[in-house]
Image: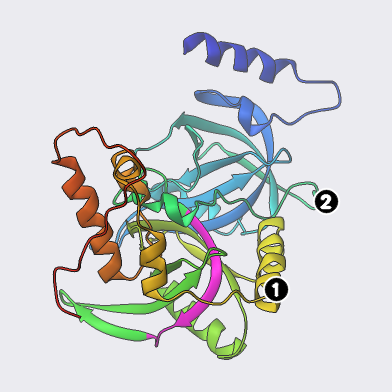
Amino acid sequence: MYMQHKLKAIKAKMGSADDEFTPLSQLTLGTNKCRVQVRISRLWESFNPKNDILFGLDSLLIDDQGETMQARVLPDDIEQFEDQLVEGSVYALSNFTVEETRESYMTCSNELTMYFGGQTAVNEIEDADLIPLYSFEFIDFKDLRSRCDDVSVLTDVLGHIVYVGEFEEVWKKSRLIKICNATIRNLRGRDLGITLYGDIACGFAEDMHEKGKEASVVAVFAGMRVESSHSVCSTTCSDYYLDLEIPEVQEFCANLRIQQENPVPKKSPAQKLAESWRTIEQLKSLNPEEYDESLPDRYRLQQWLVLSWMQHLPKVNVQGPKEIQVQPMWPD
């Protein structure tokens, strides 16, 4: 590990005659005398919503290679930088410190984090069109299960908004909490519940109200915490983007239009259940993590019961493609 950091440091110092900026990917642990050119893609105050303790002014940085790194201004230094740093702007930064990434609530998977200090120099750059405005690490809905209650790296999701609940203000443990619930759907027809808290809930509800109930909107929700395989909720790091002009959203919209123009007849729950029947050999090799979550709860439970039952069966030698069917444990 030491040699890797040493090699990165040598490369960062060498550079080229025309390149005065060091890529984020070449930064190393410690105080860096080099300069980086980055865009502040997102900017937010990180705090504990339970007691309002402020951790710092955080940001997600992007360089011209598309690399990302999270940065933090500690509370004592926020006054120095809060008027200098603007979301979406590009800066040349120097005299910052690089440390290992914190263990929780990170918005990108970079193993290093940049810290601003009193000596950090911040100079805005006007012409830097090569640096992208946004960067996300999208997770497929089917992979959310592995991130349940894991907040080491927060989650970015993308989907078509199919439901928006009413904006609410509720009292919880002597605190007035703003809440807005929504549902997004991916191209496979799987739904994901979205719960937004605080100012982001208010802003989202207002934006969706302006678009109208009939509007077809594709949304990105960034920096979310995974509650279950079917739901995510916002954190103080979260933000949302509606109909964003990035390749991932444009591709999603194009495929969504194709689906809407060529609708596939919906299958009944009974048809889905019939198609989910498996031979004993197939069930024995089925991964419990991959059972069909598109089935209604009742039929998914039946499928889960079969998987649980198979775990306790003695090993048998089955000849032929014999099928088994599970009868419901309750009357229709």
Q: Nearer the viewer, residue 275 or 158?
A: 275
Would residue 243 be found to the left or right of residue 4 on screen? right
Task: Say whether residue 324 is visible.
Answer: yes
Distance in Å between CA atoms under marks 1 and 2: 36 Å
Residue at x 61% of width, y 87% of height: 211
Q: Which residue is mark 2?
A: 127
Residue at x 51% of width, y 36% of height: 110
Residue 257 — which label? 1
Q: Nearer the viewer, residue 310 or 188?
A: 310
Q: How is the image coloured?
A: rainbow
User: Which residue reaches farthest top?
Assistant: 3
Q: Which residues are magenta?
A: 156-167
Q: Label 1: how many residues lie within 10 Å, few (<14), some (14-19) or many (20+)? A: few
Instruction: Pick whichever of labels 1 and 2 is earlier in the sequence.
Output: 2
Looking at the rendered structure, the kind of residue marked 1 is Arg
Is 264 located above or below residue 133 in the figure?
Answer: below
Residue 8 on image: x %, y %: 61, 17
Looking at the rendered structure, the kind of residue marked 2 is Asp
Would residue 211 be found to the left or right of residue 75 on screen? right
The answer to which image quadrant residue 119 occupies is top right
